[in-house]
Image: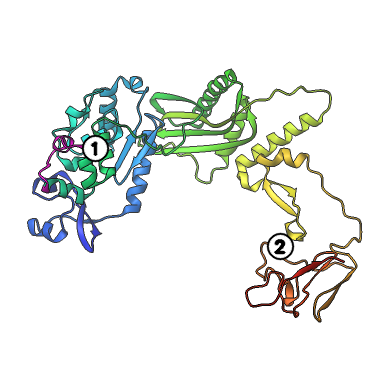
Amino acid sequence: MVVGKLNNALQITALNDAAARIGLEVGLPLANARAVCPDVQVFDADEAADAKLLGDIADWCDRFTPLVALDPPHGLLLDISGCAHLFGGEALMLRTVCAALDRQGFIVNAAIASTPACARTLTHAVRSCIVPDSEEVCAVSSLPVFALGADDAITRGLRRAGLKTIGDVAARAPHEITARFGAAFTSLLQQALGQTDAPISPRKPLPDFMVEKRFPEPVATDTVIASILSGLAQMLVAAMDKQGKGARRLEASFFRTDGAVRAITVDAGRPVTRVNVIDRLFRERLDALADPLDPGFGFDLIRLSASHVEIVVQEQRDFDTRAQDNDEVAALIDRLAARLGGRRVVVHLPQDTHIPERVVMAAPAQQYLAAASVTEWSERAEGEAAVATPASVRAAGSHRCAVRDGARRTAAPFHMAARDPCRGAGGRPRTHRDGMVEARGGDAHTRLFPRRGCGGPAFLDLS
């Protein structure tokens, strides 16, 4: 069994069937468990490792549906609407998922229902159940209230009130349950009964286009994998071409027979509509991997998806070679980004600032290549100073300063400088380029916006 520290005490957080048969249960203190069975084997809980393992199982479940959501601490929710027939129906799909996870050494229980809350409730008390539509009330009415997965305080309150089953709670008026246990529990109860529904939150957004290929015998050689990716790229390009779209981001997922999943992503600066470009990008990416693609005992599923697509704008070409040169530059940038990383291939864009080190901004070349190609850089005459404006400014009081010709170190931007809103550097009144701030009817310490008890009104004179 697994124990964790809860309420300043070690309590059981998970156990196997052998521990359950001798009377142990989740939430029981470790001291009471050792009193029942002194030789019980105990492991410390590792929440980070459990979360990582749950994420790995969710990646493996992507082979059944792309809509997979986490149901912590130890559950998953799969939206199988419209895809159960691909696996022989709901019953066969349920057995396939449970058998595959069981072969990997996991103890799993699953249920299929029209709402996530109903399916979760069934997995807490029933073994491998499928509920037809409109029969959720009959399926969950006889189950104990702890199957709803509510807080322990709510479960204890229901038992003290004599409501031991979900049917007993459903027989009460909703306003009575809400007044005693809150609106969240009432909403959970209605979802478990199939009266309302709440959508799941998938871990990954649904790709715009997706093609895949399954193999009765796992594949492991590089040449076979490359040919399969090329064939999937042809299918993907054909599907996108029907809608006049091209891929800006492509992801290839490799599902191993032992449950491990490896995903490789490539980006493009322009919508990709050619198969040879996709093959070249993935070839560059695979060759540059620090951790090479390990097939293990082979891949039984390879999937290629386009998660970001754009409408392809047809351009009329002429004898001018500038358009062809831009295409070649964009293709070169895509290849370099696939090999080196998108953040390492940059273009420089001018910035409207007077600080020398911030005049140029480095931006990813794939996203800002078009902007960089039309940007005009201002030219500075030879010997021209960064700030050279002869002027003489007289401030109120005894301060007097002059701005001389020649380059000098500029100050920080006004929004980054921590200074008085009415005073400049050195406590002098803030001045304009061709004017001054002068206070009349007060001393030199009078502010432009006087506070209570600090002098009369202030005036702004421009000279």
Residue 424: mark? none
Residue 413: mark? 2
Of residues 462 and 252, which is closer to you in this image? 462
Callout 1 amino acid = Leu
For mark 2, does the 10 Å Cα neighbourhood hold few (<14), some (14 to 19), or many (20 or more) residues? few
Image quarter of the C terminus: bottom right
Relative horizontal placement of residue 407, taking residue 185 as reference (left or right): right
The residue under label 1 is 189
**Relative to 295, residue 290 above or below:** below
Relative horizontal placement of residue 238, taking residue 437 as reference (left or right): left
Of residues 196 and 364, which is closer to you in this image? 196
Which segment did they paint magenta? 160-174
Please give the name of the residue rendered at 81% of the width and 75% of the height, measured from the top-left corner.
395
* 2 vs 1, front mark: 1
Residue 261 appears in the picture as rendered: yes
Pointer 2 and pointer 1: residues touching (CB < 8 Å)? no
Relative horizontal placement of residue 236, taking residue 419 as reference (left or right): left
Q: Position of residue 114 (x, y in %)?
A: 29, 27
Outermost residue on the top side: it is: 242
When asked about the image quadrant of residue 302, the answer is top left
Of residues 271 and 119, which is closer to you in this image? 119
Q: Earlier in the sequence, mark 2 or mark 1?
A: 1
Q: Position of residue 322 (x, y in %)?
A: 81, 31
Can residue 171 be found in the magenta stretch? yes
**Relative to 191, residue 13 above or below:** below
What's the distance in space between the residues labelled 2 and 1, CA to CA? 57 Å
